[in-house]
Image (tube, grey):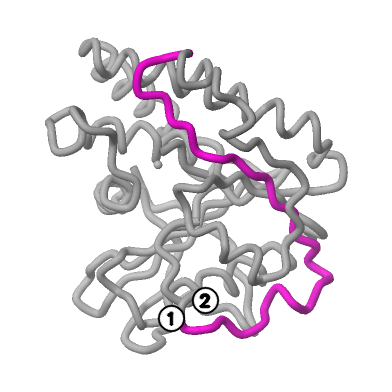
Amino acid sequence: MSPNDAPTTNIQRTTGTSTTGTSTNGVHYRAMRWEDLDDVTACFDRVWPQREGIAGTPLALPIARYLTLHYLEQSTWANVAELGDGTFAGVTLARVEGRPALFAQARDALETVRALINADPRGAQMLDMFEHVFLVREDILEEDSDVRADTQAELELFMVNPDVRGHGVGRALWEDLLGALRAMGVRAFFLHTDSSCDYGFYDHKGLTRVAERLAADHPEDAELAEGLTTDDQYIYRADLGDAALTGALDPAQDEVRGA
């Protein structure tokens, strides 16, 4: 889910095992609001920093915002975790087929920040790499696996603030996601991830890796564009009828930062 990121929207939520609207271990879970975008962007920049020469520069945060908006624009469901003092703790974004996008303003916001990034040659290079290489490779993986044929949703972004380790945020966000998707009639979903993420979380949870593109098998990628990410890319599929998806996490997996 990562390449290296108005009025409050009303979102229907699940009940029962859902954590939305509750507080657990000092963490509150609720529907995402448009006003959360800055916090999500800042966290994205920390979890997946840009390459040397861009990281820490004024260009880094707009790129993180662009990537965040790329996932948010497609999302129809979003859940945020925050500490009692309002500190952002984590987020899950998902797209469910046939459901309206959460934030209509995301498209215009994406184009605005895209123009800003394109004005810098380094930013223009990054956008070209992301849009014409990274996303193309993702599309090829989807076609090869035919994963959209038997799934009804995609997990767009799953991210936890590294500062909230030990609060069980990753586990709670994950379980709320599963409950919400089931309530919406989703039988199976898929996600993209890569070796810059904590993809072992999905192996631990019993998801099936249905496609992969290993960088070692494609040395030509390094010549496509300067600074092109050469991470391994994967697609995982989750069957919501599989009880293992909600199994307990070991302490290491409970510390997931971005997957």
Indicate the position of residue 116 as horizontal and vertical percent values: 24, 18
Q: Which mark is residue 168?
A: 1
Cα–Cα gap, marks 1 and 2: 5 Å
The front one of 103 and 228 is: 228
Instruction: Give the residue at x 29% y 13%.
Output: 118
The front one of 97 and 196 is: 196
Tell me if label 1 and label 2 are in contact, CB under 8 Å. Answer: yes
**Residue 178 sits above or below residue 144 on the image:** below
Q: Which residues are magenta?
A: 224-251
The front one of 169 and 125 is: 125
Instruction: Give the residue at x 49% y 59%.
Output: 198
Indicate the position of residue 175 as horizontal and vertical percent values: 60, 74
Mark 1: secondary structure = loop
Q: Amino acid at mark 2?
A: Arg
Indicate the position of residue 29 as horizontal and vertical percent values: 42, 73
Instruction: Give the residue at x 66% y 68%.
Output: 178
Taking the magenta stretch, the answer to whether it contains residue 238 is: yes
Indicate the position of residue 176 as horizontal and vertical percent values: 58, 72
The residue beneath circle 2 is 171
Q: How many marks?
A: 2
Q: Amino acid at mark 1?
A: Gly
